[in-house]
Image: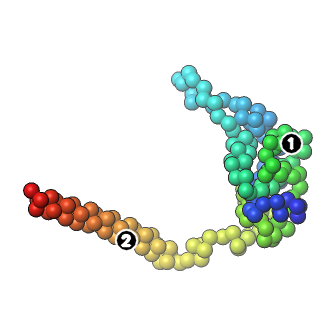
């Protein structure tokens, strides 16, 4: 695992967890062979790639980032063979990896909360605010937006007046 973590400057852990496993998705979905149809009234079929191939393509578009993918089926390595930055691994020491400073990002579906209880470092700070503080942020944001609009409109009006007055003087 050390060699994988040291490959690039950025490392991402992608794990669907142990309840929802990547290997259980049908192969046709993994390869993007299913077609999406809008309904019986729509005669055309729109080809769409589905989750696994979309995720692989998205990860491959970041060649400077190493992706560690908790992928349970070692027989399906062909899906990842053309992408040197994606490492499918059957078992990942998830808690140890999360504590490693070389891991920059973690993508999951929150099974960790079920397994390990509340994880305070993943909570939003806004959850600790009282109602007044939380709604004050909305009011401040709204007022800032209004100020920006008024300043912009004032700038445009002033520019219009200045441009037209210069234009009248020239005539």
- Residue behind mark 2: 143
Give SS at disc 1.
helix
Looking at the image, residue 147 sits to the left or right of residue 107; the answer is left
x, y (%) of residue 130?
53, 78
x, y (%) of residue 153?
28, 63
Q: Residue furthest front?
A: 170
Q: Quadrant of residue 128?
A: bottom right
Q: Residue at x 80, y 42 (%)?
A: 82
The image's colouring method is rainbow
- Residue behind mark 1: 77
Q: Is residue 24 above or below residue 102?
A: above
Looking at the image, residue 30 sits to the left or right of residue 143; the answer is right
Q: Residue at x 49, y 77 (%)?
A: 133
Q: Nearer the viewer, residue 91 or 104?
A: 104
Circle 2 crowding by C-alpha within 10 Å: few under 14, some 14–19, many from 20? few
Q: Quadrant of residue 168?
A: bottom left
Q: Marks 2 and 1, Cα distance to the nearest angstrom? A: 54 Å
- Name the quarter where the C terminus is drawn: bottom left
Q: Is residue 124 above or below residue 87?
A: below
- Name the quarter where the N terminus is drawn: bottom right
Can residue 51 be seen here? The reply is no
Q: Residue at x 70, y 44 (%)?
A: 57
Looking at the image, residue 170 sits to the left or right of residue 48; the answer is left
Can residue 54 be seen here? The reply is yes
Residue 90 is labelled as: none
Q: Quadrant of residue 120?
A: bottom right
Circle 1 crowding by C-alpha within 10 Å: few under 14, some 14–19, many from 20? few
Give SS at disc 2.
helix
Q: Nearer the viewer, mark 2 or mark 1?
A: 1
Q: Residue at x 85, y 59 (%)?
A: 4
């Amino acid at each position: 695992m050390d060699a994988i973590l040291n490959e690039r400057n950025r490392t991402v852990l992608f794990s669907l967890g142990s309840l929802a496993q990547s290997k259980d998705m049908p192969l046709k979905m993994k390869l993007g062979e299913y077609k999406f149809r809008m309904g019986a009234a729509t005669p055309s079929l729109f080809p769409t790639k589905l989750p696994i191939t979309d995720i692989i393509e998205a990860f491959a578009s970041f060649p400077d980032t190493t992706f560690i993918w908790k992928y349970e089926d070692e027989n399906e390595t062909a899906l990842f063979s053309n992408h040197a930055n994606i490492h499918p691994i059957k078992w990942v020491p998830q808690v140890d990896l999360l504590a490693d400073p070389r891991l920059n990002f973690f993508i999951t579906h929150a099974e960790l909360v079920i397994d390990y209880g509340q994880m305070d470092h993943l909570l939003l700070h806004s959850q600790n605010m009282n109602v007044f503080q939380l709604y004050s942020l909305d009011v401040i944001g709204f007022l800032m937006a209004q100020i920006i609009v008024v300043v912009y409109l004032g700038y445009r009006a002033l520019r219009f007046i200045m441009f037209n007055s210069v234009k009248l003087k020239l005539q």
